[in-house]
Image (cartoon, rainbow, N blue to C red):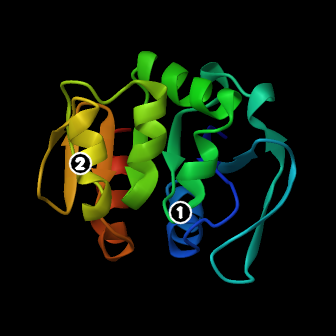
């Protein structure tokens, strides 16, 4: 079964982890929960999710695609060089790369936004534009293998667009 990675760090938006986790399975993929190190990570509430593997142990060739959830986790994800490198490798391999809400921060740190159309939560618009992104005021934006969304309310359309990259 092909794996789709989902990055985890503390303060993730629970909806933006749980919904993709099950949609990935429904589409016939194995979700691989990736953290800076294996262990439990806490959402914005007391809800936890377990990362089973460290980002340093995962290569782009191990994954069919990668999802970066939002919440405040992306601010922590971008502090992990291994996680940033994995985003960069997935992008270079042109494998489906999904980012929702504040996940644009991690994309900025990976250096993969310049000159690309994308969206994200309204509060990081200026960060994306300052990094050279072509921000679109749309709920979901797809450019090639990159799929971005503004908010957890956009999860159904986001996951539909992300999973359509495999057809």
- Label 2's element? helix
Q: In the image, is 8 to the left or to the right of 155?
A: right
Image spot of residue 98 (x, y percent): 41, 46
Image spot of residue 134 (x, y percent): 14, 37
Residue at x 77% of width, y 73% of height:
48
- How far is mark 1 from mark 2, CA to CA? 35 Å
Residue at x 23% of width, y 48% of height:
126
In the image, 70 versus 28, the foreground residue is 70
Residue 164's place in the image compared with 58, above or below, is below
Residue at x 64% of width, y 34% of height:
83
Image spot of residue 116 (x, y percent): 20, 30
Residue 109's place in the image compared with 137, above or below, is above
Which quadrant does the N terminus fall into? Answer: top right
Residue 21, quarter of picture: bottom right
Residue at x 40% of width, y 34% of height:
108
In the image, 1 versus 98, the foreground residue is 98
Residue 10, quarter of picture: bottom right
Q: Mark 2 or mark 1, which is nearer the start of the sequence?
A: 1
Depth check, mark 1 against mark 2: the one in front is 2
Which residue bears the numbered disc 2? 126
Q: Give yes or no for contact between labels 1 and 2 (Cβ–Cβ under 8 Å).
A: no
Which residue bears the numbered disc 1? 26
Q: In the image, is 42 to the left or to the right of 151?
A: right
- Label 1's element? helix
């Amino acid at each position: 079964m092909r794996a789709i990675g989902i990055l985890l760090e503390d303060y993730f938006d629970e909806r933006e982890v749980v919904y993709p986790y099950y949609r990935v399975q429904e589409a016939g993929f194995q979700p691989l929960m990736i953290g800076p190190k294996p262990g439990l990570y806490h959402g914005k509430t007391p809800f936890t999710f377990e990362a089973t593997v460290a980002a340093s142990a995962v290569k782009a060739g191990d994954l069919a695609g990668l999802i970066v959830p939002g919440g405040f986790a992306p601010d922590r994800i971008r502090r992990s060089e291994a996680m940033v490198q994995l985003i960069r490798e997935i992008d270079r391999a042109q494998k489906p790369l999904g980012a929702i809400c504040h996940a644009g921060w991690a994309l900025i740190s990976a250096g993969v936004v310049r000159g690309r159309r994308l969206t994200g939560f309204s509060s990081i618009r200026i960060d994306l534009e300052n990094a050279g992104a072509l921000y679109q005021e749309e709920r979901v934006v797809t450019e090639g293998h990159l799929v971005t969304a503004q908010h957890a309310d956009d999860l159904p359309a986001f996951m539909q667009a992300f999973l359509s990259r495999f057809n």
